Amino acid sequence: MPPQERIVYGPVRSRRLGRSLGINLLPAGTKVCNMNCVYCQYGWTRGATRYRAHGTGWPTAQAVATAVAGRLTRAAETNELIDRITVAGHGEPTLHPEFEDVSTRLREVRDRLAPGIPIAILSNSTTAGWSAVRRGLAVYDERYMKLDAGDPITYARINGAGPSVTRIVDGLQGLPPIIIQSMFVTEETHQVDNSTEGPVTEWLKVLELVHAVAVHIYTLDRAPALESLRPVPRRRLREIAEHVRAAGIPAEVFAARGSFRA
Ligand code: SF4
């Protein structure tokens, strides 16, 4: 999937978020992330773009506010249905050097022009321990935070890079209510597979530490960076969800619609 070229895109139909108006805080056309997930729909994280927090090209808070205000005004004029305003884009939005300011301005625009629409963010959780990012995350109505593995070996195989699982869990603790988003993937050789019993057991252990209000379990729906990757069968996703519920945490399964065919 090519990176976004604009600040505002969509609304896109999301399995989990409904008609979601996407907000991209990343530099146009360039994936910027500090993870390298095997399932990333934007392909592999490349050297120079691996982590460019202080590089050029990031949209200013004013540019984001202006773009979102224009789009919400147009939506109101045409009675367009939008279920959520979601900060996501082609990389990790919290790496924006002025993430807190951008988030505050986004909320102000939403409050003024579309007070009934929740603002949400999808984050890979790696920066959740940074104080300015924590303040920025607190601005949102809904926080969807990634946690795909609980042990270092599976984490390295699935997410490729980033701080340790321990640091991620520490960062997630104490945030305002979070929903954990966990992608499960498999491979015929099972070399990359977080859906088998061992990795799921380790994931459940860390899940209990982060005090999530819910867990969203899903699998591949779009072509991944690693071509040999396959979606996890719906039945296995349901079993994983049962384990989560047994731990007292609400869980929902979002199986693939079938747009990605392995
Ligand atoms: S965290 Fe998101 S953007 Fe970054 S590599 Fe993983 S899936 Fe792609």
Image (cartoon, rainbow, N blue to C red):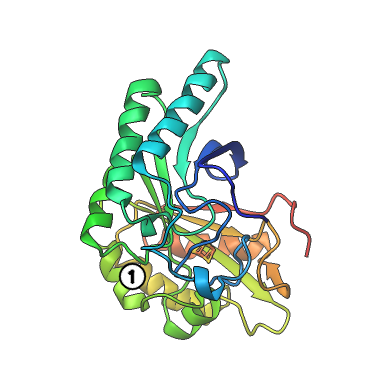
Residue 68 placement: quadrant: top left
Relative to 65, is 84 on the left or the right?
right
Q: Is residue 241 above or below residue 159?
A: above
The kind of secondary structure element at disc 1 is helix
Q: Is residue 236 above or below residue 16?
A: below
Residue 211 placement: quadrant: bottom left
Q: Amino acid at mark 1?
A: Ile
- Does residue 120 appear in the picture of this structure? yes
User: Dot 1 surroundings within 10 Å: few (below 14), some, or many (20 or more)?
Assistant: many
Q: Residue at x 49, y 74 (%)?
A: 200
Image spot of residue 59 (x, y percent): 42, 46
Q: Nearer the viewer, residue 252 or 133?
A: 133
Image spot of residue 40 (x, y percent): 59, 64
Relative to 22, is 229 on the left or the right?
right
Q: Tell whether circle 1 marks a residue whose Cβ is less than 8 angstroms from ligand 1.
A: no
Residue holding disc 1: 168
Q: Residue at x 48, y 68 (%)?
A: 148
Looking at the image, which residue sits at the far front? 56
Image spot of residue 212 (x, y percent): 34, 56
- Does residue 249 appear in the picture of this structure? no
Q: Residue at x 44, y 49 (%)?
A: 25
Location of the N terminus by quadrant is bottom right
Q: Residue at x 55, y 59 (%)?
A: 30
Image spot of residue 110 (x, y percent): 37, 29
Location of the C terminus by quadrant is bottom right
